[in-house]
Structure formats: C-alpha cells, structure tokens
Image: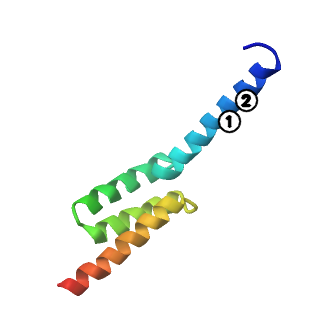
Amino acid sequence: MLGPERQKKLRFVEASEQELKKEKEQEVGATPQGRKFFMAGLTDMAAQRFASAERNFKMALTYEPSNPNFKAKRDEAGKLIKNDMSIR
C-alpha cells in the first residue's frame, strides 16, 4: 500500500497498539509494585484468603489509585470477607 492510504493505515495500527497496551495496563497494572500486589491479591482470592486479598489490592491501589480494576477487586474481596464472616 502506497501513498495516503499507507499513512492512514500506519496511524491506525500505532493508535490501536497503544490502546491495547493501555487496556492491558488497566487490567494488571502499570507499575511493577502495583502488578506485584495485584497478582498476590488474585492468588489470595483463588485460595479463598479474602482478608489477605483485600489487603494486597489496597496496597496495589496505593501505587495506582485511579486503576478501576484494582478498586473492583478490592471491593469484591471486601464483600467476600463479610459473606465469609456471616457464614461462620
């Protein structure tokens, strides 16, 4: 592809790759520390250690306070703690 069509295509590809990268960062975190605590929280959730998971998600939020995925997981862990306590 040559000419103006090539430029349009290249810009689209670059923009879409940046968008995908941003989405992935939102999912697992943009900072190494945020990712570390987020992944630890996911591990705790899988092992049904909800209090520890909530603590890890809160720590991840200290590094990335505007990450909506981190907030959602923290809230989910908090609800599961309450449900777990009411069952016992």
User: Above or below — where is 37 with respect to 12?
Assistant: below
Q: Amino acid at mark 1?
A: Ala
User: Above or below — where is 5 with respect to 64?
Assistant: above
Could you classify mark 2 by the number of other residues whose Cα lies within 10 Å: few (under 14), some (14-19), or many (20 or more)? Answer: few
User: Above or below — where is 32 with respect to 63?
Assistant: above
Q: Amino acid at mark 2?
A: Arg
User: What percent of the width, then of the height, locates residue 3?
Assistant: 81, 15
Q: In the rendered view, does 46 fall on the left or right side of 68? A: left
Residue 41: name its quadrant: bottom left
Residue 19: name its quadrant: top right
User: What percent of the width, then of the height, locates residue 10?
Assistant: 71, 25
- Disc 1 marks which residue? 15
User: What percent of the width, then of the height, locates residue 42?
Assistant: 33, 57
Which quarter of the image is occupied by the N terminus? top right
Where residue 11 is drawn, which disc sits there? 2
SS under mark 2? helix
Is any part of residue 67 visible from this angle?
yes
Residue at the image point whose x is 56% and y is 40% from the top: 21
Q: Nearer the viewer, residue 16 or 1?
A: 1
Residue at the image point whose x is 45% and y is 49% from the top: 28
Q: Residue furthest right?
A: 4
Q: Are marks 2 and 1 in contact (CB under 8 Å)?
A: yes
